[in-house]
Image (cartoon, helix red, strand yellow):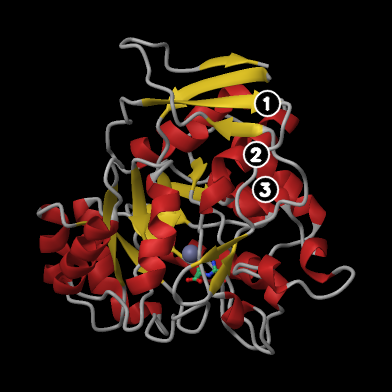
Amino acid sequence: MTTGELILRRPDDWHLHVRDGAMLRAALPHSSANFRRAIIMPNLVPPVTTSQDARAYRDRIVAAVPDGHDFSPLMTLYLTETTCPDDVACAFETGLISAIKLYPAGATTNSDRGVRDIDHVMPVLERMALLGIPLCVHGEVTDPDIDIFDREAVFIDRVLRRLCERVPELRIVMEHITTEEGVQYVWESGENIAATLTPHHLVINRNAMLVGGIRPHYYCLPVAKREKHRVALRRAAVAGNGKFFLGTDSAPHPDGRKESACGCAGMFTAPNTLSCLAHVFEEEGGLDQLEAFASLNGAAFYRLAPNEERIRLVKKTMPFDVSAKIDTGEGMLTVFDPGFALYWHPDRTYRADPGEAATKTRS
Ligand code: NCD
Ligand code: ZN
């Protein structure tokens, strides 16, 4: 039985890891079934640092899209201290890439070739500001003396504020923000600063990872923070402020690499992202804001038209069941468990009437 319905433009994912090889083929269909476009993270081994790498990776992704799925990868380049401003400019102007990704060296999975000293990448950043190329930022400092739970707030104070002073026109996406400081910074800055929010940081706080035993499938970077931060992120998501939009940061790792003495950071959320988001937005009394968050705000920031196609989510009395584990050919992959039953289901049979209203809600 259906007790609610939500029709919205097909969403996009503004921060996604799809990996390569067997993992790409296993993970990608869970995104391409739901999203029309996704900003593809370049942290492969070795990373996607040149336009040549990006073209080859884009082709491998396109080849892995299942028949019947309409999905476009939006490519990024991994910024290094030797990135060539001309290569970046040309890759953007020919439509090959949509953004550049800044990883502080050592901040997260496969970030060793990231940036150690922001001074070394100023020529690239200045060129990007001129051309309007967005910089996607993993906003955490890596100093060993900074507590891991403080690394985002310290990044804002020590790196981001300075960067915005030095290159005020640069268009920046603070990715996967996890703190009230992050929300406040983005909220108060100019129109050129936006942020993505992940479904998992709207659902869990750090207790999910640490109470009753250590639960490696809830470990990601930036690490989930205390409850007051989750509350701030939820408020931002439903506020109807165009600076906040969806970037799932769905980041698959085989179970053997997560359930380890030194487990990898990253959660695989793609299969149930939309169900989790509808649940969260309904809890916050903001279902009517889900379309802006998932389907409109990100496209507007990236200066792209929103998708014309509509999808339908239905709320049922029976929970939405995704497989807890997927066999990838590179090991089993655990799907994010929000810790509660999900009643919102994507209706895969839905085909919109032409001219259907952008958002229709009933619950
Ligand atoms: C990401 C990954 O596994 O590539 N991990 C994560 O915890 N989010 C990298 C990243 O986005 O930080
Ligand atoms: Zn990520």
Q: CA distance from mark 1 to mark 2?
A: 8 Å
Answer whether residue 175 is visible to the viewer in this image: yes
Which residue lies at the image location 42% right of the left edge and 41% below the top edge? Answer: 191
Q: Are circles 1 and 2 on residues that touch, CB within 8 Å?
A: yes
Residue 292 screen position, x and y as percent:
48, 29
Which residue lies at the image location 45% right of the left edge and 43% below the top edge? Answer: 190
Tell me the residue that label 2 is attached to.
320
Q: Along the line of sight, which residue is nearer the eye, 95 or 215?
A: 215
Q: Secondary structure at mark 3?
A: helix
Quadrant of the frame with the N terminus? top right
238 displayed left or right of 306: right
> Does residue 246 sit above or below 87 in this rendering?
above
Tell me the residue that label 3 is attached to.
202
Image quarter of residue 354? top left
Tell me which numbered mark, 1 or 3, is placed earlier along the sequence. 3
> Does residue 149 sit above or below 72 in this rendering?
below
Amino acid type, mark 3: Leu
Residue 201 screen position, x and y as percent:
66, 54
Give the number of the disc on residue 316: 1
Answer whether residue 165 is visible to the viewer in this image: no
